[in-house]
Image (cartoon, helix red, strand yellow):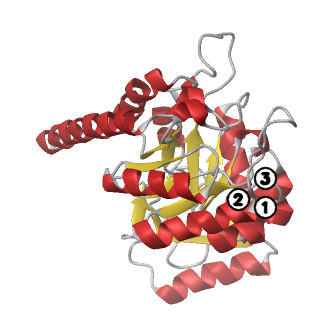
């Protein structure tokens, strides 16, 4: 729409979209409104809109991922998680144990990461594991523990949901729903998470392409949920020296293709605690809006992923390094202005 378009002109276009049996998606920017027309071969109807006042341009979105594309929304999406803004320029640290093992260890971890600058508490209540004999999580009891930690520390809560039937339960406790790599293409789960209205963090599938990842995000967006966070967590390659290969390329590339914020999980991406710090800094330098970091009071005793979990001392050093890096990046940006 033209930046001079009046509200009634925007409404007239929306009404026409509905009249044609298509679905309107309106994005209101600072300067103008953009109306997405969703439906089979929607661009074929462009002549039906040509006579309507207030339209500046009719553009075909060529990307297969429509709502996730920068063609649809040029400006960055900023997701507000109870006052914690992801994608707004700040690097948001989400830290905590891979799995919630008990209330004492969780509270100890939550207090520590909150004191060092983390904004969101991560922790697994339901854990999809490669082996059926591995620790699978404490379920709703873990969710209650995380809610207790939020009440004391002020940290927001992110945790994984693994089945459509559990979305309603997890959404009652969590501030952000995490969809893991094994569920990136679980379309029923993507849609149910989208319908929850909660912010959704979508991890990249371990063998997925960028396009497949963004199309998975489209499933959530298509349910009317605009609060989608993309998480690069490493992909499976020929390399066996690390657990996965963290795709640093994906961060700036996805930011070119999509308006959605990108965060990085260096713990899963490397599988080695000693690599988490350097890779975290590289991810932030490449443009990541946040980090998802596994932290445990005693990693050697962790019931899951101890080898990639940071102890408190190592986490503290990372937060200090991160502060210096973000300060340097801010100085560089101000010089460019």
Residue 111, image x, y percentages: 40, 57
Quarter of the view holding residue 174: bottom right
Residue found at x 43% / y 46% = 290
Residue found at x 54% / y 41% = 257
Q: Is residue 127 above or below residue 281?
A: below
Q: Secondary structure at mark 1?
A: helix
Q: Nearer the viewer, mark 2 or mark 3?
A: 3
Q: CA distance from mark 1 to mark 2?
A: 5 Å
Using the image as rendered, state which of residue 92 and residue 99 is in the foreground. Answer: 99
Does label 3 or label 1 sit earlier along the sequence? 3
Residue found at x 68% / y 40% = 213
Q: CA distance from mark 3 to mark 1?
A: 13 Å
Q: Is residue 300 above or below residue 190?
A: above
Q: Is residue 319 left or right of residue 150?
A: left
Using the image as rendered, state which of residue 195 and residue 212 is in the foreground. Answer: 195
Q: Quarter holding the C terminus?
A: top left
Does label 1 or label 2 sit earlier along the sequence? 1
- Mark 3 neighbour density, 10 Å: few (under 14) some (14–19) many (20 or more): many
Residue 256, image x, y percentages: 48, 39
**Residue linked to disc 2:** 220
Q: Secondary structure at mark 2?
A: helix
Quarter of the view holding residue 24: bottom right
Q: Secondary structure at mark 3?
A: loop
Q: Is residue 87 left or right of residue 243?
A: left
User: Tag on residue 162?
Assistant: 3
Instruction: Identify the residue at the far bottom of this view.
Output: 8
**Residue linked to disc 1:** 191
- Mark 1 neighbour density, 10 Å: few (under 14) some (14–19) many (20 or more): many
């Amino acid at each position: 729409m033209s930046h001079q378009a009046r509200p009634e002109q925007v409404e007239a276009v929306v009404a026409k979209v509905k009249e044609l049996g298509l679905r309107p998606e309106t994005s209101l920017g600072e300067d103008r409104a953009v109306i997405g027309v969703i439906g089979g071969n929607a661009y074929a109807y462009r002549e039906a809109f040509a006579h309507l006042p207030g339209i500046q341009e009719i553009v075909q979105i060529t990307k297969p991922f429509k709502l996730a594309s920068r063609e649809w929304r040029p400006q960055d999406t900023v997701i507000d998680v109870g006052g914690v803004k992801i994608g707004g320029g700040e690097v948001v640290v989400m830290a905590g144990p891979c799995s919630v093992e008990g209330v004492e260890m969780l509270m100890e971890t939550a207090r520590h990461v909150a004191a060092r600058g983390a904004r969101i508490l991560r922790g697994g209540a339901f854990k999809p594991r490669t082996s059926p004999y591995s620790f699978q999580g404490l379920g709703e009891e873990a969710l209650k523990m995380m809610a207790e930690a939020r009440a004391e520390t002020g940290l927001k809560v992110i945790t994984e949901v693994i089945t459509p039937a559990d979305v309603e339960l997890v959404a009652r406790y969590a501030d952000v729903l995490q969809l893991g790599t094994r569920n990136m293409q679980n379309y029923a789960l993507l849609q149910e998470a989208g319908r929850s209205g909660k912010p959704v963090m979508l991890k990249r599938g371990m063998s997925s392409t960028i396009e497949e990842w963004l199309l998975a995000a489209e499933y959530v967006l298509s349910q009317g949920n605009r609060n989608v966070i993309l998480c690069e967590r490493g992909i499976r390659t020929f390399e066996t020296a690390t657990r996965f290969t963290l795709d640093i390329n994906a961060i700036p590339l996805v930011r070119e293709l999509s308006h959605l914020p990108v965060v990085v999980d260096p713990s899963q991406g490397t599988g080695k605690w000693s690599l988490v710090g350097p890779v975290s800094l590289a991810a932030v330098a490449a443009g990541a809006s946040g980090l998802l970091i596994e932290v445990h009071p005693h990693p050697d005793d962790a019931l899951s992923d101890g080898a990639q979990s940071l102890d408190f001392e190592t986490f503290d050093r990372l937060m200090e390094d991160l502060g210096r890096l973000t300060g340097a990046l801010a100085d560089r940006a101000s010089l460019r202005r």
